[in-house]
Image (cartoon, rainbow, N blue to C red):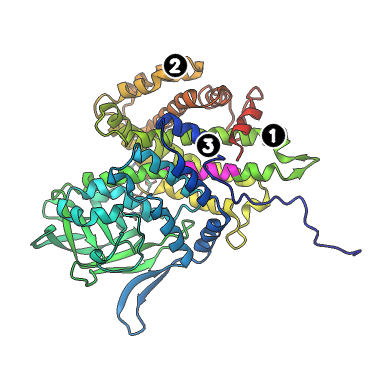
Amino acid sequence: MTHATHEVFNQPLPLADVNLFDINQPLQDAVRFNAPGLDTGALRELGRLAGSAEMQNHARLANVHTPELRSFDPYGHRIDEVEFHPSYHALMGAATAAGLHGTPWSGAGSNPHVLRAVSFMLFTELEPSILCPISMTYAVTPALQENAAVYADWGPRLTSRAYDPALKVYKDKPGVTMGMGMTEKQGGSDVRANTSQAVPDGRDAWGERYRITGHKWFFSAPMCDAFLVLAQAADGLTCFFLPRVLPDGSRNGLRIQRLKDKLGNKANASSEVEFQDALAWRVGDEGRGVPQILEMGTRTRLDCSLGTSALMRQALAIAIHHTRQRKAFGKFLIEQPLMKNVLADLALESEAATALALRLARAFERHDDAHERLIARVLTPVAKFWICKRGSHFSEEAMECMGGNGYVEEDGHGIQARIYREMPVNSIWEGAGNIMAIDLLRALRKGDVAGALQAELAPARGAHAALDRMIDALPTRIDALANETEARRLAQDVALALQGALLAQTAPAAVTDAFCASRLGGDWGQAFGTLSASANMDAIVKRAMP
Ligand SMILES: Cc1cc2nc3c(=O)[nH]c(=O)nc-3n(C[C@H](O)[C@H](O)[C@H](O)COP(=O)(O)OP(=O)(O)OC[C@H]3O[C@@H](n4cnc5c(N)ncnc54)[C@H](O)[C@@H]3O)c2cc1C
């Protein structure tokens, strides 16, 4: 062959058939710190499954063959169903079997919420968008328990590990999923602007029944079996339980208008809906809709932090895997000093995100503990704000490590590009960045949050001078904050201080030193890859190796 034109060389192999738990040392250390003694057998098993080429192919297919709305049957009857590729159902079945949707609420085992959080992270590295209904189903329980009669019927099905996608009455289903409807056209952050109306319609075994008329502008996973929705009742905005199929087997008045054409999150359906006299049962008192549904929102915010941390880890692992196989200018890319700086900087960010997100998950484990309650309250907006805010920037840089290959999707094979499109959603939904920063100010007014933060940071004192300075400065800054203008700045610095403190307790000195010097001490530029040459980059990258 004198004219061979298609000899392929210097093209890295994809990261496939790996155990996502075994190859993630920072995650393992964060698990040890937050749940010492936790049996990690189930995590190893899920790590193997989520890292398998077979499941990766399901993720690819579910993203390429996106959900389609079927409004009518062939005879013109409205059916309002969403049709998914079989790979979507394979992923949903695997996530449900792993207990990511509700198992912690069944009360079995030790550290169930941390176990579920780590499992959620591992699954995110497989496919994040199908986790939308899984996350909402996990999050709904504390809010739904306010209607004991509904919960008695639905609770066991919400925690069951059986996945049944059929649209039928709850009694005939071994497992169910739930979503939420708050956002309307005229207001998402400010849900008090909701105009959907709820009119009393009597009382039955599930309590006070209403008829709801109105709409939701964003309504994700509309094929869930039921939803918590907000609507205006006589005494104000109220939370309701709205099933898709009524107890008598007939379909409720919920019309799916269309599916959203989204930037990412492709495997998941998000819709616009209208309620036409839809039957719903009250959850909590009239006028208490916002605090009631926030019981749910708090946990989906936790999942936004866990999910983004996991996507960072995945993007980093793929970048490292690529750069250690690809050569340029006579060396593997990972050996080039400047690429090493980029990878080390990303590794610091990724480990810090993992540490903060799992610390937050631990706070949800101990609701009987006053300190943990305060930490959950303050860390939820801080972690959601900061981790999700860093996600898009992070994935852009991880993609660039792969050059042009990073930017190409190629029929769903380009995972790095898919991650990049997925990243912004966790920052926008469930309280966008500004809303989270403002919520931090609200949290700071609940009890001695400043004291709880100091207690949380205390074990790390002495680990790094820049961290000590930040810890000393925070109480004055919290006291001095007069209005919202600097709320993002405070949220950022509380997050960085906590991340530094957590790394000091879980990571090697190379990681803690470089993180504190760059993020807290100012020895850093304004893009990733600007660590000081004094950072031990070899050690940092080695620790992050997949
Ligand atoms: C893929 C996807 C799925 C979704 N799924 C659902 C779902 O299932 N159910 C549901 O109810 N919603 C869902 N949402 C909606 C989402 O929660 C809202 O988009 C989000 O809460 C923001 O509301 P909004 O779009 O009305 O923006 P707005 O409320 O108009 O906010 C726009 C911007 O203004 C900022 N802002 C608002 N108020 C202030 C203030 N006081 N000070 C400073 N800045 C402010 C916000 O931070 C934001 O950056 C989904 C969104 C997406 C993208």
Identify the residue under disc 1: 338
The location of residue 261, given as percent across then percent down, is 45, 63
* Identity, as a three-letter code, of the amino acid under mark 2: Arg
Residue 261 in sight in this render: no
Q: Is residue 389 left or right of residue 360?
A: right
Question: On screen, 439 above or below 237?
Answer: above
Region rendered in magenta: 305-317
- Residue 388: image quadrant is top left
Disc 3 is placed on an element classified as: helix
- Disc on the earlier residue, 3 or 1: 1
Within 10 angstroms of label 3, few (less than 14), some, or many (20 or more) residues?
many
Q: Could you tell me which quadrant the C terminus lies in?
A: top right
* Identity, as a three-letter code, of the amino acid under mark 1: Leu
Residue 201 magenta-highlighted? no
Picture disc at residue 443: none
Identify the residue under disc 2: 461
Question: On screen, 393 above or below 180?
Answer: above
Within 10 angstroms of label 2, few (less than 14), some, or many (20 or more) residues?
some
Per the model, the C-alpha gap separating discs 3 and 1 is 18 Å
Task: Out of 41 and 65, give the one closest to the viewer.
Answer: 41
* Identity, as a three-letter code, of the amino acid under mark 3: Ser
Label 2 or label 1, whichever lies nearer to me, is 2
Q: Is residue 535 left or right of residue 35?
A: right
- Report the predominant secondary structure element of the magenta stretch: helix
Disc 1 is placed on an element classified as: helix
Q: Could you tell me which quadrant the N terminus lies in?
A: bottom right
Label 3 or label 1, whichever lies nearer to me, is 3
| Label pair 3/1, CB-CB below 8 angstroms | no
Identify the residue under disc 3: 350
- Residue 304: image quadrant is top left
